[in-house]
């Protein structure tokens, strides 16, 4: 450090605020030093921008007070250099040659305020006080973000459970990368919210986030939705239409329910992921895409691959970074936080004034198994905001299924182990078969609905039916049921 550097610390510092003064005129520097120390601040003073930068790289300062015309590195450049430091001082720029343009440049560079010399001691004192308030607000914001992040995750995601903190950590890791992300989890767990959070923290966050529900759009229309079409490409195509991949340029495209994508479109999507190009339906022009792809599904893609319903090469292209969102029943400790979040949300949206949940009501809500996950919880709180409107949600206000949860499974518990022992594999198989048969009976043999009741994929259910030769039993029971109604 050069001879122009002086560090003077007030022995009776009242505020603990450390100010770095950068001024090449010694008499001005002395006047600033005297005033600031008299006001109780710790002061370090240097005569050049390069000296200041060296100090700022090693020592945290609360406020940087710098002249524009200092040697080696001018004040504007110094402000620009320290703007990205952590922690970053609140900066005030001084000059004796002030112009509107210079003031604008200083603020653009990141300065908090701009002082034109000569200025009074009162102006300096007031400016420093304002800078201190700005620093306090900035510090409070950083601390609040840290606290909220620790208890509620990132973005709009609400959680304090260990299992979700792992998910949120992975979300933060992948957000800044350009890799394709595959989000896995049951329906209602918040997969789209995860996608929104990744996009909001990514390098392409200034671009659009374009969602596509692959399961909600008919197969015949989905290709046009994704890639667009040219005029006259098919009956009804009266004008050229831009597809979702083009709309997502510079941003993110979110392909929800990717497991429902048919084989022809799987081939086209694979090409997009491999070559980053596509053509509109009915067109020959090749378009490039820079959209980041995030996909999601509640299906077991590995199982679909095994059953030749999903391309293996596409699966591995999508599965670059998998994120598994756990069901709500595996993070019950999040239920009170989510309820508080939904109450605030629906009070505002519905004009209600719910104040919380009674202890008995909370116990029931935490004991419920939540097959519909976070979406189901949100729906129940919204219902309370409409019907209950004010006060605490009591146990009696809750739906019947929560007040008296289904205990039918208790009737299926296998008998106690006999004296001679038990064949565990056979007992488990028998128990599983009984549950499968009951699920099929309750859904009138509709396999997709039965699979939902059992929280397994439809293809898994079909395989179990074949393996255990249960299909014949189901058919026989359906015939018997029909005859009984004749």
Image (spheres, helix red, strand yellow):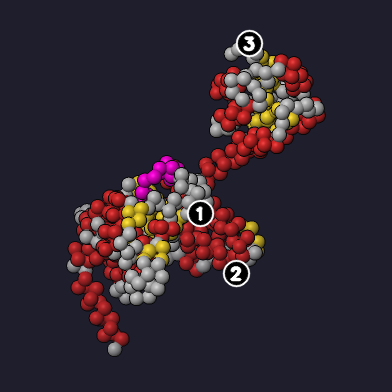
Work out which residue is located at the far top of the displayed protein and give it: 3
Disc 1 to disc 2, C-alpha distance = 21 Å
**Residue 335 badge:** 1
Q: Is residue 100 visible?
A: yes
Disc 1 to disc 3, C-alpha distance = 62 Å
Nearest-to-viewer mark from 1 and 3: 3
**Residue 387 badge:** 2
Instruction: Please provide the residue range marked out in magenta.
Output: 171-184
Give above or below for 353 relative to 178: below
Q: Is residue 277 left or right of residue 78?
A: left
- Residue 173 included in the magenta stretch of the image: yes
- Quarter of the image for the C terminus: give it: bottom left
Q: Would you name the residue on which mark 3 appears?
A: 3
Decide: marks 1, 2 in contact (CB < 8 A)? no
The x and y percentages for residue 451 are 32, 65
Which sits earlier in the primary sequence, circle 1 or circle 3? 3
Depth order, front residue of 445/266: 266
- Quarter of the image for the N terminus: give it: top right
Decide: marks 1, 3 in contact (CB < 8 A)? no
- At a point 78% along the width and 28% down the height, the residue shown is 119
- At a point 62% along the width and 38% down the height, the residue shown is 108
Q: Quadrant of residue 476?
A: bottom left
- At a point 39% along the width and 50% down the height, the residue shown is 290
The x and y percentages for residue 83 are 58, 32
Secondary structure category for the residue under label 1:
helix
Secondary structure category for the residue under label 2:
helix
């Amino acid at each position: 450090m050069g001879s122009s550097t002086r560090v003077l610390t007030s022995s009776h510092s009242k505020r603990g605020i450390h100010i770095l003064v950068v001024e090449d005129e010694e008499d001005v520097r002395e006047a600033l030093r005297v005033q600031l120390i008299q006001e109780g601040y710790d002061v370090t003073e240097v005569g050049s921008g390069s000296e200041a930068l060296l100090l700022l790289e090693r020592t945290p300062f609360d406020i940087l007070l710098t002249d524009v015309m200092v040697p080696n590195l001018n004040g504007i450049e110094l402000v620009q250099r320290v703007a990205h430091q952590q922690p970053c001082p609140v900066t005030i720029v001084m000059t004796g040659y002030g112009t509107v343009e210079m003031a604008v440049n200083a603020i653009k560079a990141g300065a908090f305020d701009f002082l034109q010399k000569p200025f009074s001691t009162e102006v300096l004192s007031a400016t420093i006080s304002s800078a201190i308030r700005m620093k306090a607000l900035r510090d409070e914001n950083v601390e609040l973000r840290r606290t909220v992040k620790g208890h509620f995750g990132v973005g709009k995601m609400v959680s304090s459970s260990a299992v979700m903190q792992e998910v949120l950590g992975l979300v933060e890791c992948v957000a800044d990368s350009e890799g394709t992300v595959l989000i896995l989890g049951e329906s209602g767990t918040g997969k789209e919210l995860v996608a929104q959070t990744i996009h909001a923290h990514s390098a392409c966050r200034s671009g659009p986030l374009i969602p596509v529900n692959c399961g909600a759009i008919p197969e015949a229309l989905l290709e046009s939705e994704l890639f667009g079409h040219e005029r006259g490409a098919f009956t009804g195509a009266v004008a050229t239409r831009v597809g979702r991949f083009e709309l997502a340029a510079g941003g993110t495209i979110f392909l929800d329910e990717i497991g429902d994508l048919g084989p022809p479109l799987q081939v086209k999507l694979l090409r997009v992921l491999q070559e980053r190009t596509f053509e509109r339906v009915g067109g020959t022009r090749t378009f490039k895409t820079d959209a980041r792809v995030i996909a999601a599904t509640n299906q077991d893609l590995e199982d679909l691959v095994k059953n030749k319903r999903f391309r293996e090469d596409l699966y591995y292209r999508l599965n670059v970074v998998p994120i598994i969102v756990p069901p709500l029943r595996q993070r019950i400790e999040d239920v009170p936080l989510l309820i508080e979040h939904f109450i605030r949300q629906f009070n505002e949206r519905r004009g209600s004034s719910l104040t919380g949940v009674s202890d008995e009501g909370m116990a029931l809500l935490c004991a419920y198994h939540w097959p519909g996950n976070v979406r189901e919880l949100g729906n129940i709180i919204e219902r309370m905001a409409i019907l209950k409107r004010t006060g605490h949600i009591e146990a009696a206000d809750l739906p019947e299924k929560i007040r008296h949860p289904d205990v039918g499974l208790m009737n299926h518990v296998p008998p106690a182990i006999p004296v001679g022992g038990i064949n565990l594999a056979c007992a488990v198989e028998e128990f599983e078969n009984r549950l499968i048969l009951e699920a099929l009976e309750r859904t009138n043999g509709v396999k997709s609905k039965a699979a939902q009741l059992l929280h397994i994929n439809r293809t898994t259910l079909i395989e179990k039916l074949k393996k255990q030769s249960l299909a014949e039993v189901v058919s026989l029971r359906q015939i018997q049921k029909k005859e009984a109604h004749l």
